Image: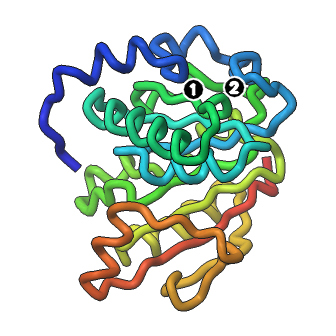
Amino acid sequence: MRIRYKKWARPELEASSFYIDNPEELKGKWKDNFENKSNPIHLELGCGKGQFISKLACRNQDVNYIAIDLVDAMLGLAKRNIEEEYKLNNIEPKNVLITRFDIERILLILDKKDEIERIYINFCNPWPKGKHRKKRLTHTRQLEKYKEFLKQGGEVYFKTDDDGLFESSIGYFKESGFEIEKITYDLHNEDIFDGKNIETEHEKMFSAEGIKIKALIAKLVNN
């Protein structure tokens, strides 16, 4: 999703207590930057405006969250959405960190010591053209990178509206040593998230257009 430049985003991010401007320096020690260092860490790749991560993190105080995006304007909106959600619930955002980084270079900021237990990938760019498919966040090339910091038995939660991306991703996960634990081609009529699904902005939009949401949970079993 393209978004207009927002001149306030960078100053607000730099002033935020939960924005990380130098994620490379936290490689291998992300847990030390959370108040509760014993909480498991979950990661959202491509958090966009933060509607998903704000609700997810606020509802699960026993989990620490990292959310990544590449665009300052998006992260600025995510920062504001997180603050608003936590304020509504009268708690401080101490279990969530957001940062700006290129996901294709993610091994520069995460490694095995970070012990990520779950990754969320929601409505990522489907990159339909053949020459661009390696850019997919679920492509084998990317999954091999995630295996470098995802704990054995860790999971990937994936949602998309795109049929082609979903079918290809099933193959990518299997090829990379993941086991498909749960899968659906119609999430809103076949809930695989045990009533805990949080709808994203894209999810609401696509559903309103009559497009079925595809989803799966993949577990790392061969690493």
Instruction: Work out whether 14 lies above or below 65.
Output: above
Place of residue 65 in the rendered image (x, y in percent of width and height, measured from the top left): 63, 38
Distance, label 1 to label 2, CA atoms, is 7 Å
- Name the residue beneath numbered marker 1: 107
Few, some or many residues within 10 Å of mark 2 (<14, 14–19, 20+): many
Which of the pair 7/127 is nearer the observer?
7
Instruction: Kindly indicate the quadrant of the structure image that contains residue 10.
Output: top left
Q: Is residue 25 visible?
A: yes
Q: Can residue 141 be seen in this view?
A: no
Q: Is mark 1 on a helix, strand or loop?
A: helix
Q: In this view, does 216 lie to the left or right of 8?
A: right
Place of residue 110 in the rendered image (x, y in percent of width and height, measured from the top left): 63, 25
Mark 1 vs 2: CB contact within 8 A: yes
- Which scheme is used to colour this image of the protein? rainbow
Instruction: Work out whether 209 lies above or below 135.
Output: below
Q: Which residue is drawn at 25% across and 32% down?
A: 73
- Name the residue beneath numbered marker 2: 111
Instruction: Work out whether 112 lies above or below 56.
Output: above
Q: What element carries label 2?
A: loop
* Amino acid at the residue labelled 1: Leu
Instruction: Kindly indicate the quadrant of the structure image that contains residue 90.
Output: top right
Q: Residue at x 52, y 47 (%)?
A: 88
Which of the pair 101/97 is nearer the observer?
97
